[in-house]
Amino acid sequence: MNKETKTIYDAVLREAPEEEPARQYYFMERVRELVELKKSEGYTAAAMVNVIGCQMSAKDGEKLQGILERCGYRSSTDADDSDIILFTTCTVRENANQKLYGRIGRLKHQAERREGMILGITGCMMQEKDEVETIQKKYPYVKLIFGTHNIYKLAELLYSTLMREKRTVEIIEDTKLIVEDLPSERRYRFKGAVNISYGCNNFCTYCIVPYVRGREKSRSAADILRECERLVQDGAKEITLLGQNVNSYGKDLNGGYSFPELLRMVAGLPGLRRIRFMTPNPKDFSDELIEVIRQHENICRHIHLPMQSGSSDVLKRMNRHYTKESYLELARKIRTKLPDVTLTTDIIVGFPGESDADFQDTIDVVREAGFDSAFTFLYSRRTGTPAASWEAVPEPVMKERFERLLSAVRESAAEREGKDEGRIMEVLVEEKNAERQGMLTGRLSNNILVHFEGPDELVGEMARVKLERSMGFYYIGCLAGACDCPQT
Ligand code: SAH
Ligand code: SF4
């Protein structure tokens, strides 16, 4: 930094407001001024945000995008043409880390060659010391590193990187602070996600999330409702409420609302056509929650209920606080009270100490619960978690079990597929079908995909579609009233 730049930089820091989010808006303005200046020298101010991981990570990506736009950057989808490339990362399984290294490895040439380019990484993986060290040592061209607790500070960190022309690294261990009212740029106009809580207190013994996302912090119901209302005013028809364990929402707020109460209030917002939520934990799934879902048609008929294992012994060692029997009982209750829901799950294969009998329990529950689909994962050892030091299941055993589980899941799903064939149902049209011209793709309330012929203007709208043919995990349909198939 030359003397003149340093004087400006010091003055900007001195004058920055202390309180949030005013401080960040101040830095967004300062970055914008810099960007305008650079533009006169041919800077194209293109920024690309890449998401690796879950919906929480995608939501972080929208926040980064919103801040960047406010800083004067235009959104780009072409890495070769970008002045800033940011990654939000995932570290829940080792392969997510490998994905990040692959992606940044491929950007080396560009990051070194393009004048003033900033390659930045944030998200869960950056809360792991070893990974940050590796990036600092082996990837000198990564110029910005920050974690999950200071994503809101992007403008401030970016300003510092641009002015100092040096790498910025800022990782915070944990925080109680929730900064509200920052910009966010949705990927889809017609749907959005809203964080209801951050972090997790459950400490399942295989899971790294509590270590990288910190302790559970619920947002106030007023802030959540305000964000939902704004989304609806801005055209959102569907909102997904996000939390690591949505149904423990509010337990950390003194006298706050519970999740069923919050859900009821969100469902009552005028104009909101669909509400989804991710992820409920079976241990806290109350009758009241089932009842709220039953009473509100706009709460989607899809429940993702991660089971992880069907063995009570494994569940105990996973610290999940439910048993094979209580899980099955809950699944039955949901199926009885909400007969039109699709029930999906997450299952981990090869948790340390999983015996053949334990695994057989998992297969039994898959058959009995009758999942509509399941995400199946090979256990991945995460440093720092209790299970990391327990004796691993040999890899060939794990892989063989994984194949058996896939077959069981496929069989169970096949039994339920096509049950709505012939019905006319509401679809939220999400996009033009990339492979077939004139075709659109939408989603039913129960999360199942439907492809059908229709005009492009329907994207983002609700449409009534006849589900003509089941193709397994999706339907081929036609717009109700718009074709000559017999409509029922
Ligand atoms: N909070 C959510 C899940 C977050 S992680 C919940 O409790 O349901 C998403 C999924 O990744 C988990 O449900 C689990 O199935 C899987 N997962 C988490 N840690 C894992 C690990 N170490 N190895 C394999 N799968 C894991
Ligand atoms: Fe991880 Fe368990 Fe928390 Fe889900 S509930 S994020 S699996 S610790």
Image (tube, rainbow, N blue to C red):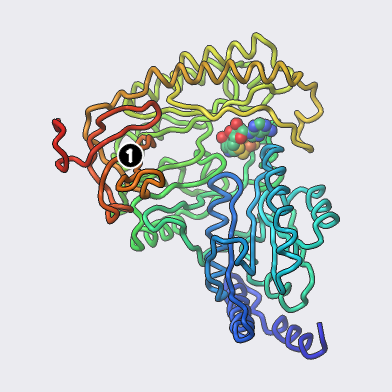
Q: Position of residue 147 (x, y in %)?
A: 70, 56
Q: In the shown orientation, is residue 183 left or right of residue 130? A: left
Residue occupying image coordinates x 53% and y 45%: 243
Residue type at tag 1: His
Name the image quarter holding residue 5.
Answer: bottom right
Identify the image quadrant of residue 427.
Answer: top left
Q: Name the residue nearer the viewer: 5 or 149.
A: 5
Q: Is residue 55 above or below residue 36?
A: above
Is the shortest distance between ligand 1 and the CB of mark 1 under 8 Å?
A: no
Seen in the picture, residue 99 relative to 372 is either above or below; the reply is below
Image side of residue 212 versus residue 322, left or right: right
**For numbered disc 1, what is the local secondary structure?**
strand
Q: Position of residue 459 (x, y in %)?
A: 32, 52
Residue 355, relative to residue 339: is it above or below?
A: above
Report if residue 265 is visible in the image.
no
Q: Quadrant of ligand 1?
A: top right
Residue at 33% across, 37% down: 450
Circle 1 residue: 451
Relative image position of residue 319 (x, y in whole percent): 66, 27
Can residue 300 be seen here? yes
Q: Quadrant of the C terminus?
A: top left
Residue lying at 55% horizontally and 76% vertically, measured from the top left: 72
Q: Nearer the viewer, residue 298 or 4?
A: 4
Q: Which residue is outermost to the bottom?
A: 4
- Quadrant where the N terminus sits is bottom right
Q: Residue at x 59, y 67 (%)?
A: 47
- Coordinates of residue 123 in the picture (x, y in percent): 66, 53
Question: Nearest the camera: 23 or 460?
Answer: 460
Outermost residue toward the right in this view: 137
